[in-house]
Image (cartoon, helix red, strand yellow):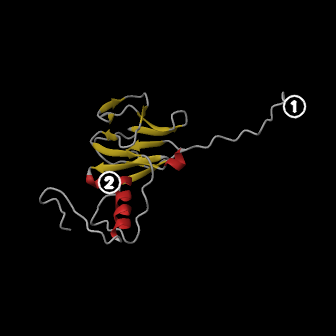
Amino acid sequence: MTVSETVKRPMEAPVSRARDLGAQLQVIFPPKLCTTLALEEAPVILGRQPGSEGSALLVDDTVSRRHAEIRWDEATASHLLRDLGSSNGSRVGGERVTTSPVILHDGAVVRLGDVVAVYERGRGAEDGAAVSREAIPGGAAATTRLRAQVAAAAGDPSPVLLIGETGTGKER
């Protein structure tokens, strides 16, 4: 090989980071709809219309049949949400969403009609047998990580000082 020769190596196909990212949409209100929707590369239609693959059923009078779409965008390495012409609108972080897609950031509050959800990036750690969901309730990724951290610290015999307002449940 001479100084003027360039070695060419085969191009690798770009790898989608959506699967590794492990994003989810936590529906938190109304209580009857509380669920977790896993989000990957495939677009997801949110709405009342049952059935089709790639759709998430949200049965609420304020949600349109095909209310909004969440899809993965390789260019921004983010999930995007766009409204599909819904009657009661979509909001992300309090801002109205139109047919132009909006980037979903970790912790973004998504409102579809009266339904409230939180977008989370990253998977929560798996709950182990030593973790009490009664003591630390919730299904959010941050809550799952907190339970894992508490379980890991529980084996340490060091004293712990709990600080907080009266009546907040420190005695449990």
Q: Quadrant of residue 13?
A: top right
Task: Identify whether 142 is placed above or below 5.
Answer: below
x and y percentages locating residue 161 in the rendered image: 22, 63
Residue at numbered disc 2: 34
Callout 1, which amino acid? Thr
Task: Identify whether 83 is placed above or below 127.
Answer: above
Callout 2, which amino acid? Cys
Question: 10 Å neighbourhood of mark 1: few (<14), some, or many (≥20)?
Answer: few
In the displayed structure image, the side of residue 161 where residue 112 appears, left or right:
right
x and y percentages locating residue 11 in the rendered image: 72, 38
Residue 98 in view in this figure: yes
Write the residue at 84% across / 29% down: 3
Q: Quadrant of residue 99?
A: top left
Cβ–Cβ under 8 Å for marks 2 and 1: no
Which of the labelled discs sits on residue 166, or is there none?
Answer: none
Q: CA distance from mark 2 to mark 1?
A: 65 Å
Residue at numbered disc 1: 2
Task: Identify whether 40 is placed above or below 138.
Answer: above
x and y percentages locating residue 72 in the rendered image: 51, 39
Question: Which is nearer the eye, 17 or 110?
Answer: 17
Write the residue at 35% across / 68% down: 131
Write the residue at 88% across / 35% down: 1
Write the residue at 29% across / 62% down: 136
